[in-house]
Image: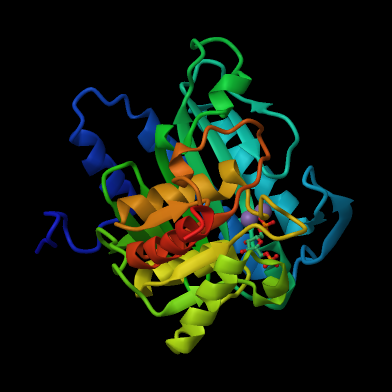
Amino acid sequence: MTNNLGLPVGTTLDRFIKRNQEDFPYASGELSQLLRDIALAGKILNKEINHAGLDNIIGDMGETNVQGENQQKLDVVADIRFTRALRNGGEVCAIVSEENEEIVHLNPNSKYLVAIDPLDGSSNIDVNVSIGTIFSIYRRKSPLGSAATVEDVLQSGRDQVAAGYLLYGSSTMLVYTTGNKVNGFTYEPSLGEFFLSHRNMCIPKDGEIFSINEGYYNDYEEEIKAYVLSCKERHYSARYIGSLVGDFHRNLLKGGIYLYPSTKKNPSGKLRLLYECNALAFIAEQAGGKATNGKQAILDILPETFHQRTPFLVGSPMMVDEVMENLKKVTSGK
Ligand code: AHG
Ligand code: MN
Ligand code: MN
């Protein structure tokens, strides 16, 4: 018996990756191995998250990361797990991470570079709410054999070769794209395998969920306030758990919009272009959705610094278009 991809029912992530690789006769297998390495680190981290309350790895490190934010113990553990898996796998020349100021150099003979938010939703760790990992994979521009450069890191989201996220929720999932549709895999812990569970994920064109931190309402621009009010007038549901991966995943499945706009205090918003927004924008577009900073598509932004932030509006295309229309009217004075 096969499903509509011609794959046997119960397709494991490994088989799916292998099958996709066979579609590209000249593929060297390095990207496939890299995706497997990320999945392995995800499994290890999943185990640690499930044990966190018992293993004394919940809570604050007592230190701040490069963004000046409090580091949780699991932020650090997650960073170590992914770095180690990618170092051992050997398919990556360098990693840039939300948790590190500088490039972490790995195998100079590898052609891929990874940007990662090892643990997304840190504020939810202590309270047993879903958290995640977000990653982007780029092909380096500098020659093989040398150390990765700043130019290798500062590529636009359009240059992503693959991107994905792990969601440690009521079940653990890996969702990724290599630029040809989006597929989701659910982890079966007793077998230690991810199985294809969500084939060719497509976001509904329109939705009735809006996800924004309304606590900052007074600090938003007028057009964002107007959009939030219009959602309420239409009796849309407000859903915001404060883990971007979780909020994004729900909206991807059900239709909706996630907004982390600029505020008076933080004109560039909070979310990081390289570690969070690019990957989710790539997935959103591949699933038929849209992602913008309010002025241009997220994927078209040319990053200037590793840790730069950007306003982020992502989700069902009709909902994103509606906000954009409002923003345009205001900018053009109509
Ligand atoms: P991180 O834990 O990687 O720092 O990311 C937290 C992000 C994101 O996951 C979430 O949507 C957002 O911060 C929540 O921020 P607010 O508490 O300001 O709403
Ligand atoms: Mn994050
Ligand atoms: Mn994080």
Q: Position of residue 260 (x, y in %)?
A: 60, 61
Question: Left or right: where does residue 262 sit relative to residue 315?
Answer: right
Q: Position of residue 16 (x, y in %)?
A: 27, 49
Q: Position of residue 240 (x, y in %)?
A: 58, 75
Residue shown at the point (83%, 49%) measured from the top left: 68
Q: Is residue 149 above or below residue 326?
A: above
Corner quadrant of residue 98: top right
Q: Is residue 192 visible?
A: no
Q: Is residue 76 above or below residue 230?
A: above
Point out the residue furthest to the right here: 62
Q: Is residue 270 above or below residue 251?
A: above
Indicate the quadrant containing the N terminus: top left, top right, bottom left or bottom right: bottom left
Q: Is residue 180 above or below residue 304?
A: below
Q: Is residue 140 visible?
A: yes
Q: Position of residue 294 (x, y in %)?
A: 51, 53
Ligand 1: give its quadrant: bottom right
